[in-house]
Structures are given as C-alpha cells and as structure tokens.
Image (cartoon, rainbow, N blue to C red):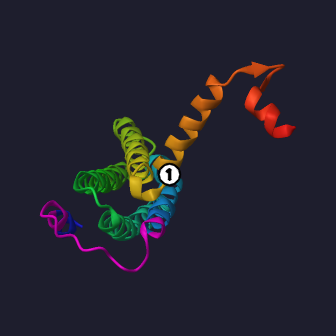
Amino acid sequence: MEQAAISATAGQLKPMEATNLQGYQNQLDAATMEIKDLIEPLAESAKSHPEKLGHNMATLSLYFDPVSRATIGAASKLTDMDRQQDLFSQARTLMEAMSDMIATSKDCGGNPNATALHPKLDENVEAVTEAISDLRLTIEMSPESGLSTSLIESIAQSRGTLNEPVENGVPVMAQHELS
C-alpha cells in the first residue's frame, strides 16, 4: 500500500481494472464491517478468555490485506490526489490501530488480573472504531462515488420544498401536481 501511496503522490497511480469504485467501496465496506464485528470479541478475549485470544487475534490480522487491496483499488479510481492521500492516510491509521490493538491484546494475554492494560485496550477499540468511521466517510463522500452528489441534490430539493408556499399543510406545487 505504501508503494501505491507514493505513486499517487507523484500522480502516477494507475487505475486498477478489477472493478469500479463502487466495487472497491463495497470491498472496503465489507472488510471494515467485519473488523468492527471482530474488535469487541477480541477485546473481551484479551481481558478474560485466553482460550479464544489467539484465534481472535489471527482472525483480525486476516483483514490487513483486504483493507490494503480495496484501499489501493478505490484510490486508483479517485481523480483527486488529495482524496487519494486522505484515503491512504486513513487506511494506514486503521491498520496502525489494528496493530496496536493486537499488540495490547497479546500483552493482556486473556488475564482478567491485567487490569492495568484494560483501559489501553478500550482505547484501542475506540481508535479502531473511529478509524473505520473516518475511512468509510472518506470513500463515501468522494464525488466519484455518487453519494455526495445525491446527498447534495437531496439537500437542494429539501431546501426548495421548504421555500414553497404551503396551504392546508401541503406545498402549493404538490397540490397542482395532485390535481
């Protein structure tokens, strides 16, 4: 992913052809939702279930590659270099937060008496959750995804509706359309 980020900085990131932006966005959404579903069980096993800890850590670590691949693919479909860099930065933040969580989980070792590490683990859970939200928002709000355009259009339409005269609780223009 770092090599792709460097290529993007130089304006030389070639569009990947496996799918379109929506496809990469779907891959990123799926991976981040899976990660989100895994972090609480990992934290719980790190605090008090050593028999599940290794499996939960290994499972979370499987998502580094899908996040990396989907991020590179999505960035390759974005035309704005700043958005590409934002996407890479937020994906790095997510992966760093995941790494920190895995390391802290290992340090906790499933030991309920390692209470000094539990607040740090809770911070890791929050950091991963926040990183997921930021990453998803960046990809969803890119002009290429279409979401921001439809959102802006919905807001404009709502503002127009708010400015219409109303009679008997129904906009005047809607009354003419119903007639």
Judged left or right of residue 170, residue 16 is: left
Start-end of magenta stretch: 6-23
**Point 29% across, 50% down: residue:** 93
Which one is in front, 39 or 118?
A: 39
**Point 40% across, 80% down: residue:** 18
- Residue 134, picture quadrant: top left
**Residue 70 location in percent, x, y?**
38, 68
Which one is in front, 98 or 23?
A: 23
Q: According to the image, label 1 marks what residue?
A: 147
Query: Looking at numbered disc 1 in the image, what kind of residue is underneath it?
Result: Leu
Outermost bottom residue: 18
Which one is in front, 97 or 49?
A: 97
Please tell me whether the stretch drawn in magenta is mainly helix, strand or loop.
loop
**Residue 30 location in percent, x, y?**
51, 63
Quadrant location of the N terminus in the rendered image: bottom left
User: Label 1: few (<14), some or many (≥20) within 10 Å?
Assistant: some
